[in-house]
Amino acid sequence: MNAANFVRIVEVGARDGLQNEKTLLPADVKIALIDRLSSTGLSVVEATSFVSPKWVPQLADAAQVYAGIRKVPGVTYPVLVPNEQGYERARAVGVTEIAVFTAASEAFNQKNINASIDESIDRFRPVMARAREDGVSVRGYVSTVLGCPYQGEVPLSDVVRVAKALHELGCHEISLGDTIGVGTPAKARAMLRAVAAEVPMDALAVHFHDTYGQALANILSCLEEGVRVVDSAVSGTGGCPYAKGATGNVASEDVVYMLHGMGMQTGVDLDLLIATGAWLAAQLGKETASRVTRARTAA
């Protein structure tokens, strides 16, 4: 497989996708979703989040879900953890890969986790230290990289500073997230270039929401710059509970369809992914956000 021609999809539907869906799904449905995703050829399926159930009720069953999923060889199942308590809960059920999160916007961090950017990074230090000792891989999320619902524009220098800090702390990969979906291709390209000047491109991923229908175009502009890791959510689920008006993540089905149409490789079976997206939409009682799924269904 040609590495330059391969794009790794990080499927975030079961965590980032579901966390803002109003329909509360039982644990067995979440387990079935992750098992279905594991069968599509995806190599990374973000499973859940060990945050306080008070803040994200949808994921209150994190331990039950993680313990119940079928662990497919060759597939990793990272989980989000906010602090040491979350880390301990995750490790208790055998988690071997975690993700930590902060934002490039001071205002967003205060609204989201009631801490400044620097304070949030300080909270990660003991988690990172324990992860190193335990041999646990850590991914870092930087949200609001192209705009914030509270402060508006986010300086590129802040995005670069936060991404670099997470990488230096030991995060093997940094996901750059347009949390409210306001980015455009030129802005996405400029943001990625700025970060890649300080963090190696092969340690970067992009994460776009589709609020203004720009996600696929933004992904394409970043692919042209050399990024080869893309976050997406099956059926276009999600949004952000702390970003009013933000719609769902870009749909995994649409991303894979675009990539395959470009001659890129993903290792993902598109038909199985489309079927999973349609199944999830039915569980949520809503129409899938995937344009590919809607087109296939209509045909």
Image (cartoon, grey):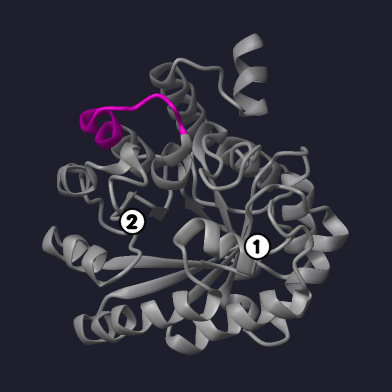
Q: Amino acid at mark 2?
A: Val
Is residue 230 placed above or below 258 in the rendered structure?
below
Q: Position of residue 231 (x, y in %)?
A: 55, 54
The mark lying in front, picked from 2 and 1, is 2
Q: Which residue is mark 2?
A: 75
Q: Position of residue 207 (x, y in %)?
A: 61, 56
Secondary structure found at label 2: loop
Secondary structure found at label 1: helix
In this picture, residue 48 sits left or right of residue 27: right
Residue plotted at (31% across, 27% down):
25
Which residue sits furthest left? Answer: 92
Residue plotted at (53% across, 63% down):
110
Is residue 296 placed above or below 115 in the rendered structure?
above
Q: CA distance from mark 2 to mark 1?
A: 20 Å
Is residue 6 in view?
no
Q: Position of residue 35 (x, y in %)?
A: 29, 38
Hey, which quadrant is residue 3 in on the image?
A: bottom right
Q: Specify few, some or many for label 1: CA neighbours under 10 Å numbering under 14, 14-19, or 20 or more.
A: few
In this picture, residue 76 sits left or right of residue 142: left
Between residues 186 and 75, which one lies in front from this camera angle? 186
Q: Specify few, some or many for label 2: CA neighbours under 10 Å numbering under 14, 14-19, or 20 or more.
A: some
Residue plotted at (54% across, 75% down):
117
Q: Earlier in the sequence, mark 2 or mark 1?
A: 1
Is residue 142 placed above or below 256 in the rendered structure?
below
Is residue 142 in view?
yes
Which residues lie in the magenta part? 21-32
In this picture, residue 46 sits left or right of residue 240: left
Q: Amino acid at mark 1?
A: Asn
Q: Which residue is mark 1?
A: 5
Is residue 165 placed above or below 185 in the rendered structure?
below
Quarter of the image with the C terminus in it? top right
